[in-house]
Amino acid sequence: QTGRLFDRSGKLYGREVQQKQLVGPFQRVLSSGGPREAIYVSGVSGTGKSSLVQLHVASSTRSLNGRVISGKFDALRQRQPCEVICQSLDNFCRSLSTATDGASFGLRNSIAGVIDAEGLGTLSGLMPSIQSILPPDLAQQTRLGRRSSGLEGLNQLFYYLNLFIAAISSTATPILFVFDDLQWCDEAAFDIFTRIITERSLASFLFVGCYRDDEISEGHPLQKHRQDLLEAGIFTSDVILGAFDKGESNEYISDILHLPKRITKSLSDSVSAKTSGNPLFMKEFLLSLCGEGLLQYSASARRWYWDMEAIQIKDVTDSVADLLTSKMSGLDTRVQDLLKLIACLGSECKASTLSKLNVFADIDLMEREMFLKILTNEGMLSQIGNDMYKFSHDKVQQAAYQLIRPLDRAGLHLEIGRQLRKKTPTATELDSMIFTIVDQLSRGLDLVTDQKDKKEIARLCLMAGKKAMAKSSVGPASIYHLQGTALLQESDWTTDYDLVRIHTSLSTYFRSPLTHSSTFIDEFPQFLK
């Protein structure tokens, strides 16, 4: 018995059918080295899509000495979807560079053995950490290697990317790609996934994508992506998650309260009805009952008790986000301020990034670490490594963002962007954070009135557009350049001719129906000089 409501046992409830649906592809592709496949796990927010994949497929892959490359798309970073893929691959290279087991050593040799210096130079633009897994002499050749541009460069990029993945995937080391929240993925990122999945040389490669099916509207790029796989002869399957029924809800609550189902049935029926059987909503509702003293643990009796009458008449918010926001409002004001700041930066952020920001009252290093620990203990954040923090669920991020008054959001984003720009004085630092800085500034553009400030943001938009296009992200690049053009005025033609010329020329290209043609891609590099 324990007084903790959730013991983090990792048990899945009501997902026996879905687990069986995952067994077939896993055994065919990863266990037996069969041809590549793709699985799509769907359901509304809070139904446990990520948990199902991580606990059932990802853990099983690692037990086979396989590797998991994972990423999560973000509602607040929708201009950077390709960056999610690049970061995931870079994280894989970074982990490979520090691993000491024989299999990792073999993978490093395999990569260096099948990809030449030119290819490694091309890939280092996507995943800089690949330099750390190469022999020093080959890494030096990579830095001196030629980079192609235009359509040739785009094709070269995909060619070497597929060679890289083929080098790390085998029956001895199967590869699992897991990407979450595909509803926020764009056409360019889906094109990368399609090219990887349809590569004939790949074996022991399984792709798993999770998405909210109620947020996929007609014309979403996911639909074209799946049609492309179908036409290429790739076998795909669907795993659909719904809400808990009453029996599954009772099993869930019976387990976490360590009481027989016959005792918890009336409670679980009430909780299930109030939350529509949504697992995340149920969890947060139970925690709120504890917070209000309606669900309590008796140390003397060593069991949980609850006020059934009060629970039955208790009003429940319409969404889990509202429930979480109410919970967050009870935190210390300065802890809330830090939570708001993190929510503005997306689903995850680095502590080193937070250290650059002084948007609210001064918070020193010791206080920030203490506040982060509070948020981690509350289950709102989880820590990854020494520097990274991420929200435990995107609904938690949404709730934290709702703490900010709508009228204050633009100003907060603008101030974050300005402070990050000020704290990135070197070209290297600015390049590493350019997307974050521009996206933050963009959310506060309506508050920028000084033309000098507008021109500075236009210059940053140009940098972001160039970097996005260098990674073949046409869609995000177009947004950056069109936005940069809108910030300029006619008088800037005489004072900043080159800046205006490049932005307006590129904006004209991006508005053209030829934007995605080979002609456009071939001619684009002239503007990157």
Image: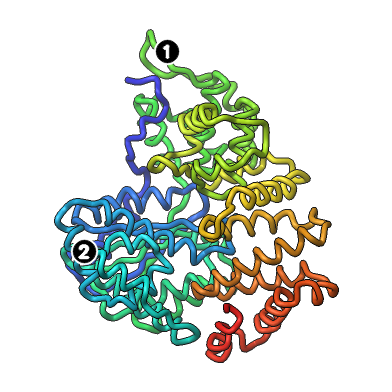
Left or right of 129 in this view: 97: left
Locate the N terminus and report the quarter of the image it occupies. top left
Q: Residues within 10 Å of mark 1 (few under 14, many from 20)?
A: few
Across and down, in percent, residue 14 comes to 37, 46
Q: What residue type is disc 2 on?
A: Leu
Across and down, in percent, residue 248 comes to 40, 41
Left or right of 249 in this view: 117: left
Asked whether 104 or 525 is in front, the reply is 525
In the image, residue 234 sits, relative to residue 464, either above or below, namely below
Which disc is residue 107 wearing?
2
Across and down, in percent, residue 273 comes to 54, 38
Task: Work out whether mark 1 precedes mark 2 in sequence or the reverse, and give the earlier one.
Answer: 2
Asked whether 363 or 526 is in front, the reply is 526
Q: Which residue is mark 1?
A: 298
Locate the C terminus and report the quarter of the image it occupies. bottom right
Q: How is the image coloured?
A: rainbow
Residue 139 location, quadrant: bottom left
In the image, residue 102 sits, relative to residue 25, either above or below, namely above
Q: What residue type is disc 1 on?
A: Ser
Give the residue drawn at x 72%, y 46%. 409
Q: Helix, strand, or loop for circle 2?
A: helix
Q: Residue furthest top?
A: 300
Give the residue drawn at x 23%, y 76%. 114
* Label pair 1/2, CB-CB below 8 angstroms: no
Left or right of 328 in this view: 213: left
Residue 511 location, quadrant: bottom right
Q: Nearer the viewer, mark 1 or mark 2?
A: 2
